[in-house]
Image (tube, helix red, strand yellow):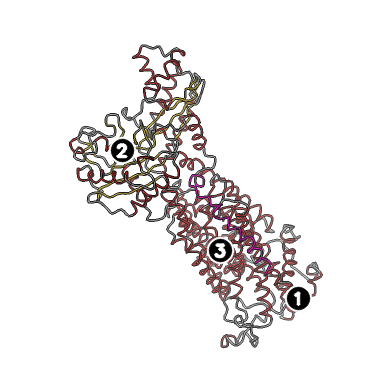
Amino acid sequence: MAKCKTDCIEKPISLIFEKFGRIVGNYPFVFFILPLLVAAALGAGFMFLDEREANDIEDQFTPVNGPAKQEREIVLKYFPQSEEFSQLRLSSEGTYASLIITGLAKTNIWTEAAFTDIIELDRQVKNITTGNTFENLCAKTKGKCVSNEILDIINYNPGEIISTTIRYPMNTGTFLGTSVGGVELKTGGSEISSAKAVRLFYFLKEENTTQNTLWLTGFLKFFSNYSELKTVRVSYFTSISRQNEFESNADSVIPLFSVTYFLAITISILSCLRLDCVRTKVWVAVAGVISAGLAVLASFGLLLYCGMPFAMTVASAPFLILGIGVDDMFIMISCWQKTKVKEEVEDRLAETYKEAAVSITITTLTDVMSFYIGLLTPFGSVQSFCMYTSTAILFCYIFNITFFGACLALNGRREKGNKHWLTCMNVPEVDSVDATGNVCCVGGAYDKNTGTDEAMPMDLFFKNHYSPFLTKTWVKISVCLFYSGYLAVSIYGCLQLQEGLDLKHLATDGSYVGSYYDDEDQFFSSYGPNVMLVITDENFQYWSSDARQNLDSCLEIFQNLSMASKDSEIVPISWLHAYMNFGESAGINLDIEKQFKQNLTRFLNGSGFSEDVNFTNNTILASRMFIQTVNIRTSVDEKNMLNAFRETAAKCGKLQTAVNVMVYHPAFIYYDQYAVIVSNTIQNIVVATCVMLVISLLLIPNPLCSVWVTFAIASVIVGVTGFMALWDVSLDSVSMINLVICIGFSVDFSAHISYAFVSSEEASVNEKAKDALYKLGYPIIQGAASTIAGVVVLAAAKSYIFRTFFKIMFLVILFGAVHGVVFIPVFLTFFGICDRMSRTKPDKNTQCEMQSENSNRNSQQVSTVKSNGQTNEGFTSPDCY
């Protein structure tokens, strides 16, 4: 059968690597020292680390060009912050401190004793002094600090909490929905009979940034050392708390780096350890870990030199890079061990590079492309992580074929001289039969039949025990049933997946921020954001009855939404309705444009609506109204609310007289992630999968492998997504990173096992599966173990971000490895189309096609094989992927 020319890229890459490997083998000291110097030079970029840190939560964990950010700019343009403070009309969260006060057992707090403590707390907060007093820094209305309504109602007299009739949620025009929580009303009325929580706010003026930060820091310090009062407990929060706690996340993982490198070195040494004191690869294993560390140092330093932002998520990248770098090391060691031990070191290294070329190139390209595709996402944290990680993987590739290759060559010279791995002293050669009893005194054993290193015990396990077991008929049936169960559970998990990043997860475990958010969710989730409806149409004719009718229809649509409050007392009256009532009572015909505009300024100044209308140069440039939302308890509720409000705004623009309404609330900046997280994740997965297929088609000389690459990618992604949902991980910007990673790693495991199967010269599908597992089973397990070792310490991190990274990476590697050594080998045996890869077996003529510099070596190899009783047909170079 004529050979199918599908190796037009694979073959040149192998030849280029062969030549380069020979150069490294001839000049190992050059390639050992030069990478060290490069890493040291580029590593100096870490002096810019503090300048490059990009840990602003809004910038990193919300969509870069999210609609709410643009809406905020519009609000700021038309409604700049007034000197008269109004929490309702803030375009941002504001600068504030807050207390949630509950009973010690979260029981009724509506008592005189509890309010005695609450008033004392309020007094202590206002007395906090940090170079300036609260009185000087507080946000003011009518010249007085903004106070807390519930304390105003009882005139700061705890006895009046019982004697005063206080209604909920509206009490004589004051909204208490965000101030009092866990409320029970008296039968048949709206009077409060008991409550479980009271919330106090302390807002500061925006312009005093430095002084505000000092005071808020003093507030946090005060309550961090605060002892519980007799009747109440306190959870506290400030507008700088979330950011402070987020920035402290990195501190929780820095101590884990040393543990990770210790684990990686230990696992690498153990997996490469031999009893033979010459053939053992202890120093090679250590060099592989050092090579990955140098790659991180050089790549991160280069990007820091270039001014690339360094987000918090990047702190987890070194753990991943370590696993990837060590994985490539195992591949190169595996190929080295299949070369002839009696050949010259440069020849062995050339053969190693030739055989490992496609494998490590595929691994690198798939991983790098997966991460570069992650740059398409609108989240700064994802972009930063992907840029640093993809660049580090490229450097891993470079350092593996230079620094690590040089170490492999130097180790080869030691082996060729039959020197001890530790003392580097000559030891007597020994046959493999005698090696066991003289481990420390003699060494250098090798397989006399093949001329290569003796097979590792795990390789023999896969050849003699595991693969024969896996190819039994009843085992195949069991594997299919097990896979069906895996797929069913995965699909169920996908249906349970939640979206969005809970902001409390940005703080470390046990943080006061988490306690505050828990109390807020428990007691103050009945009422959600008070959403702005902003009309920015300068041509809207407010004086026209038809236009007002359309506006009322628009407002009615908003009010009919399930998440909008239907309580007429809660719904804030719009400035326009109030103005029309004013005109009617004053006998002014406001249907006339001139009259409407002449009296508008007087009305606004005296009614409290002056901040809701931008009336400039006799034109209403913009105006706003508000809708109170209710029962926004979960991320699903937040997503549904955002979508419903924006869809309703779009409907208003399609009325007979268009009402161009924009909806906004500061929380929408964080809710925007729901609008893009799913679509962007799917986009990244689809694009990355297509790129992986192209890379596989170009580098693997058989198109059939692409089918199995696609199958494995889809299967692993479904499994990881499903099980991460069952492991309490939501789909957010953090987990999105890992799903992109998932694609690259699923290719790593699946492409090589599929190619090894179809390229095998064995006659039957079962024998092909055995051959593929013999060649790749142990390297897959080594790679999986090393990668998991790189991230396993993150399971102990006190941060949700890093624990999530561990969880998903663990699932990716676990499922990828299971597909590689269990599912794919079995499934491949079911399809006859993969029985044989069209290829011409090498003979003397085809061997002569090798470059002239290798001709003598090839002739010697053929002679050696023939002298061992093997036919020339059976002699093929090992497939190392």
Q: Amino acid at mark 2?
A: Asn
Residue, disc 3: 323
Residue, disc 1: 862
Between 297 and 475, which is closer to the camera in this rendering? 297
Residue at mark 1 to residue at mark 3: CA–CA distance: 38 Å
Between 738 and 322, which is closer to the camera in this rendering? 322
**Could you classify mark 1 by the number of other residues whose Cα lies within 10 Å: few (under 14), some (14-19), or many (20 or more)?**
many
In this rendering, the label closer to the viewer, 2 or 3: 2
Q: Amino acid at mark 1?
A: Val
Would you place residue 292 above or below residue 222 in this image?
below
Would you place residue 204 above or below residue 351 in this image?
above
Residue at mark 2 to residue at mark 3: CA–CA distance: 54 Å
Q: Earlier in the sequence, mark 2 or mark 3?
A: 2
Residue 143, given in percent of the width and then of the height, sits at 35, 32
Callout 2 secondary element: loop
Picture quadrant where residue 567 is located: top left
Residue 37, given in percent of the width and then of the height, sits at 66, 65
Picture quadrant where residue 391 is located: bottom right
* Quadrant (top left, top right, bottom left, bottom right) of the C terminus: bottom right
Residue 839, given in percent of the width and then of the height, sits at 72, 63
Q: Is residue 711 left or right of residue 12?
A: left
Q: Is residue 848 left or right of residue 115?
A: right
Query: Is residue 238 at all visible to an observer of this figure?
Result: yes
Dominant SS in magenta: helix
**Could you classify mark 2 by the number of other residues whose Cα lies within 10 Å: few (under 14), some (14-19), or many (20 or more)?**
some
Q: Amino acid at mark 3?
A: Gly
Residue 47, given in percent of the width and then of the height, sits at 58, 58
Between 839 and 137, which is closer to the camera in this rendering? 137
Residue drawn at x 56%, y 63% is 322
Which stretch appears magenta? Answer: 33-61
Callout 1 secondary element: helix
Judged from this view, the residue extending furthest toward the front is 131
